[in-house]
Image (cartoon, grey):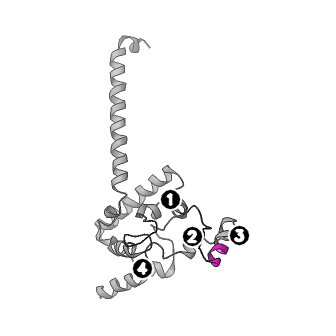
Amino acid sequence: MKFIKNNGGAVVIVCIVAFLIALFVAFFAAKQVQSTSTVEFCNSCHEMNPFYETWAAGKHGTDAKGVIRARCVDCHLPHDSLANYLSTKTKAGLHDIKAHWMGKKTDWLGIWKNRGPYVHAAYESGCKECHKKLIAPGIPLKAITGHKAYLNGETKRTCLDCHHDVGHGDLVTKFREIQASAK
């Protein structure tokens, strides 16, 4: 306490400087999260071109008319908490950077055929973030029945079980084209 009384002005200055540095770091981090959340950033690696092309032509892409335009992070990051969002974003980003630098080739066609778990699966919390009203006027009876069962917890099916091609359309054809051109 004696130190603080004798050096009160210095302590205040150190606290103010520390606060300003923390504020700058937080602002910089927020800007980085924002700038790395664009579709253009995600497509900046050539490995993402097939995903970009099929997304752009898909129901939530740039060519879509009258529906929600989703960014990569809207589907491929969880929206259940900020901590989980940032943690998953960091892990996925580090994985992608490592794969890009090491020239890692992924058998996307094999993964898609087997529907096994893979690093950048879409998160159902992303679907729910935008699609809050699942029983909407004009949807078919089959969809109403399925959505009611989902909302009532009467099914284990997820959004992606029924709508697996909503984000990227026909990825399988795109993967086959890439595979054929590589031979």
Q: Residues within 10 Å of mark 4 (few under 14, many from 20)?
A: some
Q: Which numbered dot is residue 78?
A: 1
Q: CA distance from mark 1 to mark 2?
A: 14 Å
Q: Are marks 2 and 4 in contact (CB under 8 Å)?
A: no
Amino acid at circle 2 = Cys
The answer to if 143 sits in the magenta stretch is: yes
Residue 179, image quadrant: bottom left
Does residue 82 lie above or below 8 as drawn?
below
Task: Name the residue at 33% across, 88% down.
Answer: 180
Q: Are marks 3 and 2 in contact (CB under 8 Å)?
A: no
Q: CA distance from mark 3 to mark 4?
A: 30 Å
Camera-nearest residue between 152 and 26 = 152
Q: Residues within 10 Å of mark 1 (few under 14, many from 20)?
A: many
Q: Which numbered dot is residue 171?
A: 4
Task: Name the residue at 44% across, 81% down.
Answer: 110
Amino acid at circle 1 = Pro
Q: Earlier in the sequence, mark 3 or mark 2?
A: 3
Q: CA distance from mark 4 to mark 1?
A: 22 Å
- Determine whether the residue tagged by mark 4 lies in a helix, strand or loop: helix
Q: Earlier in the sequence, mark 1 or mark 3?
A: 1
Q: Position of residue 131 (x, y in %)?
A: 54, 63
Q: Which residue is mark 3?
A: 154
Q: Which label lies toward us, 1 or 3? A: 3
Does residue 137 lie above or below 129 as drawn?
below
Q: Earlier in the sequence, mark 1 or mark 2?
A: 1
